[in-house]
Amino acid sequence: MSVPTLPLTPEQEQEAQVLVAQLQEAAKEDLLQLARLLVSKRTEELFGQTEFEVRDRVLRIGAQAYELHLREKKTATKAAASNVPAAARRLSTKTTAPKRP
C-alpha cells in the first residue's frame, strides 16, 4: 500500500529531509531490534504477542519523530497574561505554633 505524497513547500521539504536524517539515526537501534524480532520468529509466531512487541517498537519510533520535530519548534506559551491579581504580600513560611520553652 502506497502512502500519497503530501504537497510541501520547498522549505517544508528541506525540513522533512533534515528530520528524516535525524530520525534515521535516532531510530536506528529500534529498527534493528524490530528486524531482529521479526526474523527470530517462525511464521506462526508472527501474530499475537509479537504483534504487540512490533507495535511497541513502532510507537517508540513515532514518539522519537515527535520529540525530534518538536525540539526544533518554539514551545513558549503565547497565551494572554492571567487577569488574576497578584497576592498583596507573601505568606510567612514560619511555623505559627507557640514557641516551646
Image (cartoon, grey):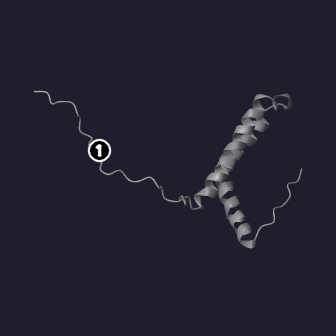
Q: Residues within 10 Å of mark 1 (few under 14, many from 20)?
A: few
The residue nearer to you, when weighing 86 against 67, is 86
The residue nearer to you, when weighing 93 against 59, is 93
- Residue occupying image coordinates x 15% and y 30%: 99
Give the quarter of the image for residue 32.
top right
- Residue occupying image coordinates x 79% and y 32%: 41
Whether 19 is drawn above or below 44: the answer is below
Residue under label 1 = 91
- The residue most toward the bottom is 10
The residue nearer to you, when weighing 25 against 67, is 67
Q: Residue 97: x, y in percent?
A: 21, 30
Q: Residue 85: x, y in percent?
A: 41, 54
Q: Residue 11: x, y in percent?
A: 71, 71
The residue nearer to you, when weighing 26 against 69, is 69
- Residue occupying image coordinates x 79% and y 28%: 48
92 relative to 13 in the view: left or right:
left
- Residue occupying image coordinates x 14% and y 27%: 100
Figure disc tally? 1
Amino acid found under the numbered disc labelled 1: Leu
Quarter of the figure that contains the C terminus = top left
Whether 91 is drawn above or below 46: the answer is below
- Secondary element at tag 1: loop
Q: Residue 21: x, y in percent?
A: 68, 60
94 relative to 87 in the view: left or right:
left
- The residue most toward the left is 101
Whether 37 is drawn above or below 101: the answer is below
